[in-house]
Amino acid sequence: MFQQRKKQFEARANVLKAMAHPSRLFIIEELEKGERCVCDLTEMIGADVSTISKHLSVLKQAGIVVDDKRGNQVFYQLRVPCVLNFCSCVESVLELQAQDHAATI
Amino acid sequence: MFQQRKKQFEARANVLKAMAHPSRLFIIEELEKGERCVCDLTEMIGADVSTISKHLSVLKQAGIVVDDKRGNQVFYQLRVPCVLNFCSCVESVLELQAQDHAATI
DNA sequence: TGCCTTTTTGGCAATATAGCCAAATACTAA
DNA sequence: TTAGTATTTGGCTATATTGCCAAAAAGGCA
């Protein structure tokens, strides 16, 4: 039931795990507007460049973004257009959470 | 840019993190068919009951499932219908990965 | 070449996650 | 009450993740 399809679930989980971080979600949302270089994202997020670089490599490894070296900068862009859809699903979970919270007051 | 909306991204990331595990993805997919008790899921996954129970509590904490105690069993069901949409997005990432892999042979 | 900028990599410490066992809890039924 | 089943919780170890600093690469330009 599960064991036969374990690899498939692991593959999906890997993609999700790559998205499941605040900075990486921000990066994804930002890349929906267009490509960005590492320095742009670093400034917007306000963490060490090395940290951002590692986040980007996580996203790249998961197949969510691709990079393009131009000059001494590296530009990243999304490979997949559907991330917004997906976020609306997450959003609906959060709305339910908010309702729960309101109900307990 | 990011710091102002940090909480929002953290909230989304928490929902994603809760989904980002093979067994929990399986549980979500299974619950799309209808409610299941802990014992059903345990048998389907083939891990210790305590492990499954903890996975379910992660999903519950994230607001993805709700539980309903009946007799000495506990039934879980999804709170949110949109998970399938979301999976098709993850799937499209995986298809690209497969293409990449084919290209490197 | 030498210097500057951009990005990646290695290494480390702190923290979080996963999964098992054992024990506790909760409910059923005799 | 006692025994049995279903589930959760505590505790433990192993493993993974995060984020910083320092250093290495890689390219641009004087």
Image (tube, coloured by chain):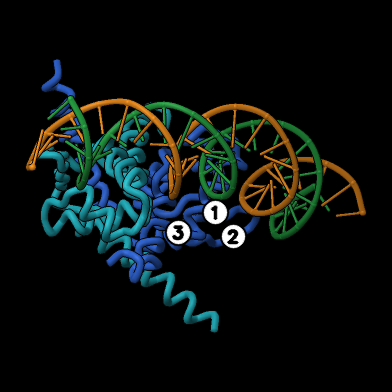
Chain colours: A blue, B cyan, C orange, D green
Q: With respect to residue B77, does A5 lie above or below?
A: below
Quadrant in which the C terminus of chain A is drawn: top left
Q: Residues within 10 Å of mark 1 (few under 14, many from 20)?
A: some
The amino acid on which the numbered mark 1 sits, given as a three-letter code, is Ser
- Mark 1, secondary structure of its residue: helix
Quadrant in which the N terminus of chain A is drawn: bottom left
Left or right: D15 in relation to C28: right
Q: Residues within 10 Å of mark 3 (few under 14, many from 20)?
A: many
**Quadrant location of residue D12?**
top right
For residue A102, say whether it is visible: yes
Q: Nearer the viewer, residue A85 or B70?
A: B70
Q: Nearer the viewer, mark 2 or mark 3?
A: 3
Which chain hosts label 1? A
- Mark 2, secondary structure of its residue: strand
Residue ID at (35%, 36%): B9
Q: With respect to residue C17, does B27 lie above or below?
A: below
The amino acid on which the numbered mark 2 sits, given as a three-letter code, is Arg
Residue ID at (42%, 57%): A14
Q: Nearer the viewer, residue A86 or C24?
A: C24
Residue A38 x %, y %: 55, 47
CB-based contact (under 8 Å), mark 3 and mark 1:
no
- Which residue is tagged 1? A57
